[in-house]
Amino acid sequence: MRKFFNLPTLILFVLAVRILFSFLPSFSVDMGTWLSWANRLSTLGFGKFYSEAVWTQYTPGFLYWLWLVGKAGWVNELVIKLPVIVADIATGVLIWKVVKKKNPNFAPIAFLVYVLGPVVIFNGSVWGQIDGIMTLFLFLSVYYLAEKENILLSFFFWAIAFLIKPQAIAIFPVLLLIGFKRYKIVQLLKASFAGLLAIFIGSLAFFPKNPIFGLPQLIQKMSAFYAYTSVFAFNIWSLVGMWKPDSLTFLKIPFVLWGSLFLFLSVIITCVFLWRRVKDKKYYYLAAAILSLAFFVFPTRVHERYIFPFFAFLLTAAGLFKSKKLLEIYFLGQLLNLINLYHPYAYYTKNFLRSEVLLKFTATLAPFIGATFLLIYILLIFWEKLPKLNIFDKLIKFFKSTTSVPKKGFRDVFPKINLSNKISKTLLLAILLSALATRIFSLGSPKNEYFDEVYHAFTARQILNGNSKVWEWWNTPPEGFAYEWTHPPLAKLGMVLGMKIFGDNSFGWRIPGAILGVGTVFLVYLIAKSLFKDEVIGLVSAFIFSLDGLALTMSRIGMNDPYILFFILLAIYLFIKEKDFFSAASFGLALASKWSAFWAAPIFFIIWLVLRKMKLKLSLFWFIILPPLVYLASYIPMFLTKHDLDIFIGVQKQMWWYHTRLKATHPYTSAWWSWPFDVRPVYLYTSEEVGGMVSRIYNLGNPIIFWFGLVSVFVSAVYSFINKNKNLAIIVLSYFIFFVPWALSPRIMFFYHYLPSLPFLAIATGYVLRKQPKLLIGILTIGLLVFIYFYPHWAGLKIPLWLDKSYYWFPSWR
């Protein structure tokens, strides 16, 4: 672990993570601008770049990189984002260096908290903006004043930041005040001249005919272009309303002048705050943070990203002061600004990260967030006089109070619940029988294929009838159906088996998935019990999972989802038990159901690392041999229809191309991050209204299970961290591993892709309820009642229209 926390290793890790995030869709407007400017600069050069005919309102700093990109022929999004990522990491390294002197234990944490902070990742790696580069040079300007006492380099680096973005002006009063208080007038004048000279030289190539006034006129034009109260910044002007002309007046004074007055007063207040503390260099960073925040909160014409430098300075101050209050403000600010960043991103960019529901919700939050940022500014000015909230300490104390940690190693201790072996077996049997009953009741209805059964179940029937066309992607299927070759065939072969036993009917092709659904409930019990050595956690986790609507509906439909889920969980359970041969075979069956089973590979590695102590055994080589063999064996029915290996390879290529190139739309598609909130379920089936009765199958999660479960996941993450509970950490990581990678998917996504995460959400819930037994009966009872209430809506039972209308709690549920 210590080796991991050395700086070079962390830098490589962060670089990999940040580059991975960079493949998410950029902010199309800004990225399109960067790419076009790179081409324009490579063609026209510096002197002819600015134009009245083309929008080119940006200071020259970053344009030098775009010129190089264009000249080298590297005009692509990753190359645009790469210097931002490097700048963010460099800023993180500087934070590490500064904090290490006063707070060495916090230094690596500060580095990770900054470079992997949601605002920093979203702004640089996803959006593709360059605030991180400006922040690096701003931080260097304060760093050289505080740590190196070199005012000349300090002003030089500030000048570079100003050339990149004029918003660098925000912290200049801090530099000026420190220079005036700590240095001779001659030194201050030399540093000021050096800064002005750097700005002049840096902009000269772009203004050969107007070297003196070219840059000031450009900045004036840039300011006048967005003459509005707020340009999507959730600041105090969001209370008045964003995008209103700032020429509007209050008490006969224009909003723009009010904003300037507020900013001027905030600068005076901050300088007074720093004046008395100027000998303590820790306050340099805090004062820079306060002014960066003020420049975002008070003036008009501000964008959502103007607050960006605030985070680097505040985090450094929190580390230097060893202040949990400042750290709490930092995390709150990150959350609020992330919401702010998402709003314009989703407003202008239409991709899988966009949600209409979330877009409206963030707009509603704007005035509240603006008021909160104003409050944060006031809190920072008076932060030393605030009462010691110590929220982190209180949380840690609470979590530790519910866990006994012996000095000789960790062993989880739970409140005592008397449960005999006979009662345990009876409860388990009752859970499994109820799961079976709810999954097979009226399973044959509707009698015809619905939703994606028109692909999966239809193809299974064709395989049953010996139709060789199902393996040939070039064939045209009957109208309303499609040959399903876009996934491996195991699930379809399972449906074939069901139809051979129960007949060529809807019950036949659905019953294997329903049985596997019950098996999944049992596996949730086994995994939970194995990891925590506690019968109650196993029973509660299984019961929680059995009550969920998403798990129920997906086990009652002829699709491949219940197959992949069962075999993934079976492989994980067998790997925990060190049954490597059978685990590898089960993993192969999961892959033969759906390619997304590959996402289980990191879980095997984590279990091997944590539970099996990285012991190398020959049996592990089964994971190299068996999965591909099992996968290949699933295509035996194809080979028996006289298709050769070339067709097999061709199908794999077609599958890959289909999933990476699919450009489709659907009214019920949803973003991956929305799934845990149960925001956008999927209509699987709906019948016509007859006699005031209707039948629908709705792919909706049990709200109680979902929402309490999501809280339980994060509570479990805290438990695992505070109590060093590695087994619980496996559950938390497994939960995220199975749905977060969908962020990288180029194709449309649906709510039911969240299904593999649900067993781990259920286990996390079982763990939390075991820790807090006072909640146990209440949550299980409410969850059961909600399950009974929604069951007709999940199982497609005929119900009165008035009952059906009661299910749509939110507009997005329709």
Image: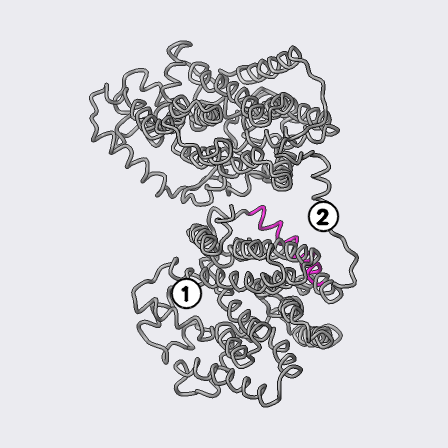
In this orientation, which residue lies closer to the viewer: 581 or 433?
581
In this orientation, which residue lies closer to the viewer: 176 or 675?
176
Q: Position of residue 176 (x, y in %)?
A: 62, 80
- Quadrant where the C terminus is found in the figure: top right
Magenta segment: 356-374
Residue 254 in view, yes or no: no
| Residue type at numbered disc 1 | Trp
Would residue 604 appear left or right of 231 to someone viewing this image?
left
The image quarter in which residue 498 lies: top left
Numbered disc 2: secondary structure: helix
Q: Position of residue 237 (x, y in %)?
A: 67, 65
Mark 2 Cα-neighbour bin, 10 Å: few <14, some 14–19, many ≥20: few
Q: Position of residue 624 (x, y in %)?
A: 33, 30
Q: Is residue 41 magenta?
A: no
Would residue 283 appear left or right of 131 to someone viewing this image?
right
Q: Residue at x 36, y 79 (%)?
A: 48
Prevailing secondary structure class for the magenta stretch in the rendered image: helix
The residue singled out by tag 2 in the image is: 393
Colour approach in the figure: one colour
Label annotation for residue 305:
none
Q: Is residue 611 above or below residue 60?
A: above
The image quarter in which residue 809 lies: top right
Q: Are marks 2 and 1 in contact (CB under 8 Å)?
A: no
The residue singled out by tag 1 in the image is: 34
Q: Is residue 258 above or below residue 477?
A: below
Numbered disc 1: secondary structure: helix
Q: Is residue 366 above or below residue 722?
A: below
Foreground mark, 2 or 1, reads 2
Q: Residue at x 27, y 17 (%)?
A: 466
Residue 315 in view, yes or no: yes
